[in-house]
Image: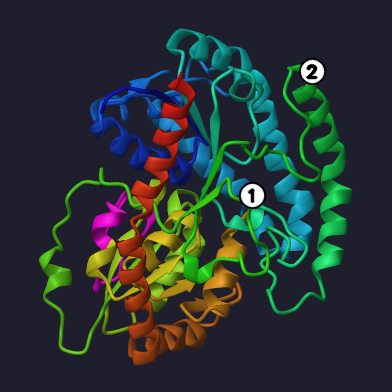
Amino acid sequence: MSQSLTVLFMPESAHGPTNQCIGLAKVLYDRGHKIVFAAERSWEGKLAPLGFVEALVDLAEPDPDATEEAAGQFWIDFINETAPEFRKPTIEQLRSFVQPTYQALIDGAKYVEPQLKATIAEHRPDVLVEDNVISFPALLTSGAPFVRIVSCNPLEVRGADIPPVFSGYAAADRSGWAEFLAEFDRTHHETWAAYDAWMQEQGAPPLPERDFVHTSEVANLYVFPEELDYVAARPLGPTWHRMDSSLRETDADFTLPAELANRPDGSALIYLSLGSLGSADIGLMQRLIDVLGTTEHRVLVSMGPRADEIRLADNMVGAPIVPQTNVLPLVDLVISHGGNNTTTESLHFGKPMIVLPLFWDQYDNAQRVDETGYGIRLSTYGFTDEELLGAVDRLLTDQTVRRRAAATGEAIRARNGLYVGANVIEQVGLAHLAP
């Protein structure tokens, strides 16, 4: 590399966006670039071993009594308090979950603004990379170019001919779209207008209507497979670049335990993961485990932060955290919450999915997987035992679905989305340095 860049990543603090940025950052680091992570402080000690600079930030006033256990307890409490909202129709969640979540993110953005300005002044990045659902003025006013990453479902980039984001509505049925958008405006406009005014007070451009995040003028990336994409109905401009998947190369090695490797003839290996948040819903996790425990199949379970409260069946092995990208190639079927990372990574390896969405864009991913024929969407809290077992049997025995998913996975791997994204970021930075 003739020139070494300083690249600053600002991911949302959730595991999905941060892990996605880690994958891109590792490629750039291996090319000789300096990587700075302005990540939330709970990532302390996890990024530096990869060679990255930890310029960590606080999104709220630090609790002097907080411990690592307390941080984990926060997410457990979050699920306990909000899980009842996930049983509601998505249009009702706009008021009870989506708007409060945006407000919490906005509060964090306002708190972190002076820290981000100081970090940018210290490290003087050549390109800034944001993977979040809201904008941060410091990233827009630094004088260096910024790259936006959409690592949620790309319905986040709105269009008149695609379903409203967060709805989980079918692409072929517009009957509820207008009502959903009207409810979004009713529940969100006041929050949006206040944030737009604050953004402009900090010197940032106005926010696009209905959106809490800006589109970059130079380069935007989104993580979603071509086979599931919406571009036929909502074309994107030349600044947009699709990463079909963004498979990080930093997960720990994984060897299949003997209990799972030595399976009876005719049995399959199933991976069950509801993500770092969904797995904290012990009632839902235990129900899925109990039903799957009646099958002849073997199940690998990502158990999450409350692993010690979960009772696995005899046909299962689990751990609080599973190196997902090294597990997925080994399994026959994925049962998940529909997080964007899990959805795109599963299809990257050509695995059919059963999706039980909980919140945010998980409904959109679940619907898209179902309507494009790569899996089955089930009612997360309303499924019957027979529905779950029937979906498992169908996706394990339908050879048309399995062959199609496998072929799609092969095509996605050939397109090498991780390197597509890294190349775009690198080109933006080099163009900024060019005389």
Judge by depth and name the residue closer to the eye, 83 or 32: 32
Tell me the residue at 61%/37% (across/down).
216
Neighbourhood count class around disc 2 (C-alpha, 10 Å): few under 14, some 14–19, many 20 upward:
few
Pointer 1: what residue?
82
264 relative to 41, above or below: below
Tell me the residue at 77%/40% (across/down).
208
Residue range corresponding to the magenta coloring: 309-327
Please say whether residue 293 is visible from this viewpoint: no
Instruction: Report x, y in % for residue 426.
Output: 39, 34
Examine the image and state in which quarter residue 363 appears.
bottom right
Amino acid, disc 1: Thr
Closest to the camera, between mark 1 and mark 2, is 2
Would you say residue 330 sits in the magenta stretch? no
Would you say residue 317 sits in the magenta stretch? yes
Instruction: Report x, y in % for residue 402.
Output: 35, 83
Judged from the image, the secondary structure of the residue bearing numbered disc 1 is helix
Amino acid, disc 2: Glu
Judged from the image, the secondary structure of the residue bearing numbered disc 2 is helix
Pointer 2: what residue?
201
In the rendered view of the protein, which quadrant contains the N terminus? top left
